[in-house]
Amino acid sequence: MTPIRIASVEAFAYRVPIAVPIKVAFGTFRDRPSVLVRVVDSDGVEGWGECWCNWPSVGAEHRARLVADFADRLVGQTLASPGDAFQMLTEQLEVLVLQTGEVGPIAQAIAGIDIAVWDLAARQAGMPLYRFLGAGHVDSVPVYATGINPDHPEQYALARHAEGHRAFKLKIGFGMDLDLRNLRALREALGPSAVLMTDANQALTLDAALAIGLAAAPLDLRWLEEPMRVDVPDAQWRALAEACPIPLAGGENLRGGELDAAVSGTVLRVLQPDMTKWGGVTANIAVARAAVARGKSFCPHVFGGGVALLASLHLLAAAGGDGLLEFDCHPNAGRELVVGGMLTVREGSVPVPQGAGLGAIPDMAGLDRYRTWPIS
């Protein structure tokens, strides 16, 4: 593997206006933020990453500044392998995490840097990232339409079906009556062949989660995602897993040893880590392969910009198994200025880019109108 000599690390924060707010159980998206990371080596080869930054409202600019601050620790360093940046920054920033209590933002900044370094290394090698990670050729991966709001979701889902989608995930946590009404409306509108799943974003109690699981079981859902808070006692999670007829899914709000425990345990049958929240490529490829080896579905969580989407796609392609890629269908001009028309959905799948690295480079000139940091 060619050593990586880091010449520069930059971060850029963007906010894209949206016409229709996106509702989840814990809040509402009123714009689409993103933080892109660019790492350049001494030969001028660049790699791109993305940090999770959806919340709070100032999250994007804060994380971009963190990346810029951490850059001083990398510039001038020579990495023997792409994973060295993640390991080095994680160790060096342990005390800062304790000092600030900002375990999430710091982990997200490191994750964005890690993704960029892996993209750079794969570009150096002239290989698509998933192949650089050791996988054989993959033509396409299955996807599911995500972020379906509780307001007449069947209309939105039917429009996505016409675009080629065959799997759909509904947001719940808005009251039992409305949640069930929406799930039944989706099944009736989309028919028995559609793959349906649902996400409560940690909004339910044990009793409420079990109630919706039992009531929705006849609708043949593939999974019930994050029905309860991730920090409720393990005994409650085990009780729900044993009694709920719908497989439980989660992982986007777990890190490190928590994900290892979820992989080895029996509660979650679908693993959904978010590589832009924690771990980047370095940590999540190990989680993904361990989950698949244990017969679980690996379905990476992603709800961000185009770099996050491409990186998650390559991670899924490298992991194998029967997982699906989360695919945000809401308008997002910032995402499209990265992926363009690369990921056209056909019969529930999208093509895997075969170019070097992630297979795309952000349109920086087009994105500039949405940039909020650094200010030019």
Image: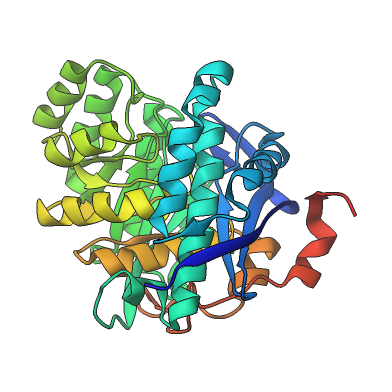
Measured as percent of width and height from the top left, residue 194 is found at 29, 64
User: What residue appears at the point 49 percent right and 72 percent down from the top-left corner?
Assistant: 358
Left or right side of 71 for 26: left
Query: 204 or 343, which is in the foreground?
Result: 343
Is residue 268 rendered to the left or right of residue 110?
left
Left or right: 255 with respect to 119? left
Q: Nearer the viewer, residue 147 or 56?
A: 56
Q: Is residue 148 visible?
A: no
The percent coordinates of residue 94 (x first, y second) are 47, 27
Image quadrant in which the N terminus is located: bottom left
Question: Compared to 22, does 282 lie above or below?
Answer: below
Q: Nearer the viewer, residue 211 or 272?
A: 272
Asked if residue 106 shows in the view, the reply is: yes
From the image, which quarter does the C terminus lie in? bottom right
Which of the pair 197/236 is nearer the observer?
236
Q: Residue 128, how many percent across, how many down?
A: 41, 78
Residue at the image point whose x is 45% and y is 54% from the top: 146
Spot the residue most to the right. Answer: 376
The residue located at (22%, 38%) in the rendering is 260
* Above or below: residue 369 compared with residue 68: below
Q: Residue 100: image x %, image y %?
A: 58, 19
